[in-house]
Image (cartoon, rainbow, N blue to C red):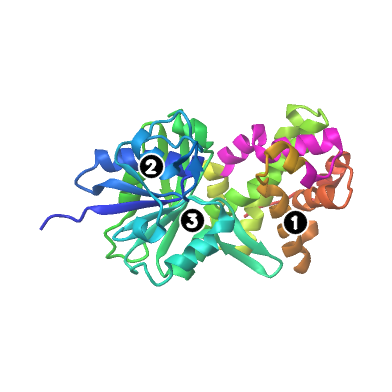
Amino acid sequence: MAAPRYRVSVIGSGNWGSAIAKIVGENTAGNPNEFDLNVRMWVFEEMVDGKKLTETINSKHENVKYLPGIRLPDNVVAVPDLIDCVSGSDILVFNVPHQFLPRICSQLKGKIPATVRAVSCIKGVELSADGITLIATYITEQLGIYCGALSGANLAPEVAQEKFSETTIAYKIPNPADTISQKTIKALFHRPYFHVNVINDLAGVSLAGALKNIVALASGFVDGMDWGDNAKSAIIRRGLLEMTQFSREFFPESESSTFTEESCGIADVITSCAGGRNHKLGVAMIKTKKPVFELEELLLKGQKAQGVTTAQEVHAFLLKRGKTADFPLFTAVNDIIFNGLDSSALPRILEQVEIQVD
């Protein structure tokens, strides 16, 4: 009896969604015994230069709005209807802005067989003073399917241009009888230019993708003050320690090695602190003294620096548990943004607590 060929759909078509669809399309074409050739990519329909975006993608094989200049494989098919896109699929790849996820899940709820498996490429977590929900866990709870998580030092344009990078996928086989194994997931995403390591640590991979944005803001403060590379290295080290401590304390099943050895950990922190959105905003806050939300609008053209919201939510979470003193860098970033703390106080604040992680 022939082995099944898995049908794959990508939900989302921004620059990162399109870059991932490119990777997945290349791999389904290169593994015809394991995967169905065509990859359906859900596209929120809009008009671009007088034409429907889906029609342009399918005729030009290029996402002219969100990933211009990059040719998508011919087997990546843009689909404007979400239900049509996922119908009959075995593997779903979620790659949308996280604020749109509840609406998408509400449309899919009750329409996805329990045997379907998913991978979330959405960085971040749902965090409030009351608790933390991993994005992959949210998808699992809403749709009744197992969902893993992909996160790493992955700037979408560089990945799309096939510049070498690595990523980490958390995918723990939910059932020993599952045919969609870690090997299958690696085959779907691994490319000569995009190296994949598959691990079991869903909490660590998910939290790393959210908490690193707070560290990136802090590194921006340091660069804004022109303190140099030694200071930035110190912030990265302390940030990694707090990320690891936070994960281990509130998700004891997570692994410290995820933060120190994986692309989703130390590598993503380095990339984000070198010049990502949050770093850019942190620099501007110090140099211009303008309010953070004004700078977001000015510098990011309506996009959001997730670190600002994450810093505020992490602070509320820690405050409710009386734990702010145990995370001095996270607390200081919140206070610099929202409470007028002078960023030059960072060395004094960090001197008070030296974190030890088991």
Q: Which mark is residue 94?
A: none
Report the amino acid beneath label 2: Glu
Task: Answer few, some or many: residues within 10 Å of disc 2's Cα (few below 14, many 20 plus, some between 14 and 19).
Answer: some
- For the N terminus, give its image quadrant: bottom left
Report the amino acid beneath label 1: Gln
- Dot 2: what SS? helix
Which percent across, then down, holds residue 31? 24, 42
Which residue carries the number 1 mark? 312
Residue 250 visible: yes
Which residue carries the number 2 mark? 55
139 left or right, relative to 245: left
Which percent across, then down, holds residue 165? 47, 33
Magenta-colored span: 265-294
Q: CA distance from mark 2 to mark 1?
A: 41 Å
Mark toward the start of the polypeptide (2 vs 1):
2
Task: Answer few, some or many: residues within 10 Å of disc 1's Cα (few below 14, many 20 plus, some between 14 and 19).
Answer: many
Mark 2, mark 3: which one is toward the viewer?
2
Q: From the viewer's perspective, is residue 272 above or below residue 293?
A: above
Residue 354 or 210: which is nearer the viewer? Answer: 210
Mark 3, mark 1: which one is toward the viewer?
1
Which residue carries the number 3 mark? 201
Report if the CB atoms under discs 3 and 1 are less than 8 Å apart: no
